[in-house]
Amino acid sequence: MAENTALTPEQKLFAERLNRMETAIRLGEPDRVPVAPFIASYAQRSQGSCYADLYYNYEKAGEAALEFYRSHPILDVHTFSGFTSGKANELAGSQMIDWPGRPGTMVSPYSSHQVIELELMTQEEYPEMLQDFTGFMLRKYIPRAYKNLPGTAGLQITPTVVLSTGMLAPFYSPQAQETFRILGEIGAEDAKAKEVTGQYQARLAAMGFPSMMSGISEAPYDILGDYFRGTMGIFEDLLDEEIQEYVEQACWMFADQQIQALQYFRYVDMPVKRVFFPLHKAMDGFMSPAQFERFYWKPLKKIMLALIDMGVTPYIYTEGPYNSRLEQLADVPKGKVLYHFETVDMKEAKRILGPVACICGNLSITELEFGRKETIVEQTKRLLDVCAPGGGYIFDLNGCLENCKPENLEAMFETLEQYGKY
């Protein structure tokens, strides 16, 4: 008996949507402009769930996501990134974020997490971090970043004759043992969140919705600024020529670490191969063009080129104004990168980047929440008129939508349906 290879309607939809996205990324013209707004947060709220459920009520949040995408077939991807364990963060005593649903939080259940920026590495500690990264993370970083995990502070492994377990003595202290016990509980909670995330993402795929991305990374400079030095600290570092050398070394080190962490793309078969890079600290005015090239763009580009070599699309999500960076962003292989823009002249972005990279973004989430329906229709048509001709364009908003007037969202979708065809 011949094997039945016919695709289900949902499988056909999945293939059509995936092809539509990939055609645009390769600078082609699909049958219509792909629609890929970062909308998962609003999807929760619109279906009776909230952002806090992503941390504490996985089933309610997951079912809300399924219902939203089921009722909006114009979407070509889902941006449901899954669940983060609020319980795991409570157990760890995470210091760098406050999150909805946490006991005692000031964050609304309808808002995403809020960053609490800390200086977790001093300027004087650059040499220690660069020379012994793992040791620095154990001895200093983890106890500072997670208040309930102090047991690795000061851990020092001394080389000795390994004829017994004596070298392991630093791990025997009551403080270290308690930290390892808590780590076990944290791991169990994170595993639950990961398992349920996989289940709901598989259900979205079975409904015919590919994921927007299959990995996440960061620009090395942002890793250093976000998680080690803080914004003000890294600004100060750029004023000192001696410290600049450390900044550059750290950025190249983080680039190599990220490339190694992303090697799974070489071995795992997956339909979507895109890595999301949110760019936090390089918008216009944050640094000079020369500083951007040296500290930000070159280490980031190294990761991008490594991904492209693996057959992966870097999904570069710029934040803030980027008009002065467009020429540098154009220095990439043709048809291999997707750029998102929050605040940029899209006509200039199309002119400069259009020949080499797919672009998306720019529709105002503020207008979606507070503006008039007529304004949304005008802005959507304007973006289509400017960006769609010639291909290489995906429709998206200028940020992640948390709330909006339902009539505005529906007007946007109707306009895309009417005017988005090639």
Image: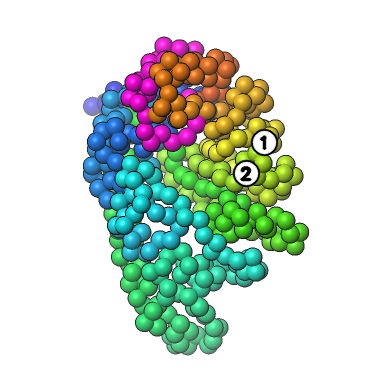
Decide: is 79 above or below 139.
above
Identity, as a three-letter code, of the amino acid under mark 2: Ala
Circle 2 sits on which residue? Answer: 282
In the rendered structure, find residue 247 and report the number of the disc placed on it.
Answer: none
State which region is magenta: 395-422
Decide: is 415 above or below 126.
above
Q: Residues within 10 Å of mark 2 (few under 14, many from 20)?
A: many
- State the residue at coordinates (41%, 27%): 370
- State the residue at coordinates (65%, 39%): 284
Q: Earlier in the sequence, mark 1 or mark 2?
A: 2
Identity, as a three-letter code, of the amino acid under mark 1: Arg
Residue 157: percent from left, percent from top: 52, 80
Question: Is 360 situated left or right of 63 in this image?
Answer: right
Residue 77: percent from left, percent from top: 40, 30
Quarter of the picture holding the N terminus: top left
Q: Is residue 411 visible?
A: yes
Decide: is 204 above or below 19.
below
Circle 1 sits on which residue? Answer: 325
Residue 153: percent from left, percent from top: 48, 75
- State the residue at coordinates (42%, 75%): 151
Decide: is 378 above or below 331.
above
Q: Residues within 10 Å of mark 1 (few under 14, many from 20)?
A: some
- For mark 2, give the secondary structure: loop
Q: Do the numbered discs 1 and 2 sit on residues whose CB atoms are within 8 Å?
A: yes
Q: Is residue 36 visible?
A: no
Front residue (pair 328, 365): 365
- State the residue at coordinates (33%, 41%): 110
